[in-house]
Image: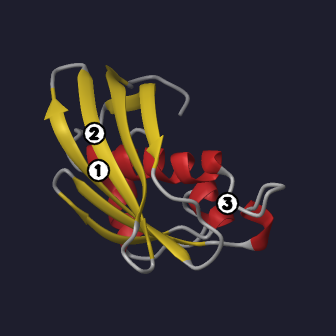
Amino acid sequence: MSDYPAYLRRLQAGEENLNPFLTYFGIVTEELREGYARFRMPVRPEYMQGAGFMQGGVIVAMADEAIAHAIMTLLKPDTGITTIELKSNFLAPVREGELIAEARIFKKGRTLIIGDCLVTNGENREVLRCSATFLAYPSKGDSE
């Protein structure tokens, strides 16, 4: 998928199963605007690790998706993106409820784009802070 403007329009219209990752994890797109994305995800029992806390990689994956979608709002249809670096700080454990990820684009260059995401729980407690660098590339002729 490299026609991100068309994809985002379809996503915002509520088209089901458009993004299998988001569907699988129950992630709902709440808001998309220029350089910004807000996602919501339920905390489910199958996301827990052995100690009874939500597995951190699931939270990081949600943040990565939120940043990617914030980036998509700034791209031309013939541009692809891929994560090339990601740093996460876990701030609080999660056992239940829901998570909200708010991503903003910090810097958009010609080929490198940096975004930040803050994930909070339903009580507005900060759970994770994530920063990611993405590579933008021409996607004409790719197989996405």
In the image, which disc is placed on residue 70? 1
**Which residue: 41% across, 80% down?**
123
Tell me which amino acid carries mark 2: Gly
Q: Nearer the viewer, residue 132 or 95?
A: 95
The number of numbered badges drawn on the structure is 3
The single residue placed furthest to the right in the displayed view is: 50
Within 10 Å of the Cα at label 2, are there few (<14), some (14-19), or many (20+) other Cα atoms? Answer: many
Q: CA distance from mark 3 to mark 1?
A: 24 Å
The answer to whether 109 appears left or right of 86 in the picture is left
Q: Earlier in the sequence, mark 1 or mark 2?
A: 1
Within 10 Å of the Cα at label 3, are there few (<14), some (14-19), or many (20+) other Cα atoms? Answer: many
Q: Which residue is mark 2?
A: 115
Within 10 Å of the Cα at label 1, are there few (<14), some (14-19), or many (20+) other Cα atoms? Answer: many
Q: Nearer the viewer, residue 78 or 94?
A: 94
**Which residue: 53% across, 34% down?**
144
Residue 115, image quadrant: top left
State if disc 2 and disc 1 touch (CB < 8 Å): yes
Above or below residue 100? Residue 83 is above
Q: Which residue is mark 3?
A: 54
Residue 114, image quadrant: top left
State if disc 2 and disc 3 touch (CB < 8 Å): no
Measuring from the top left, give residue 73's x and y in whole percent: 24, 50
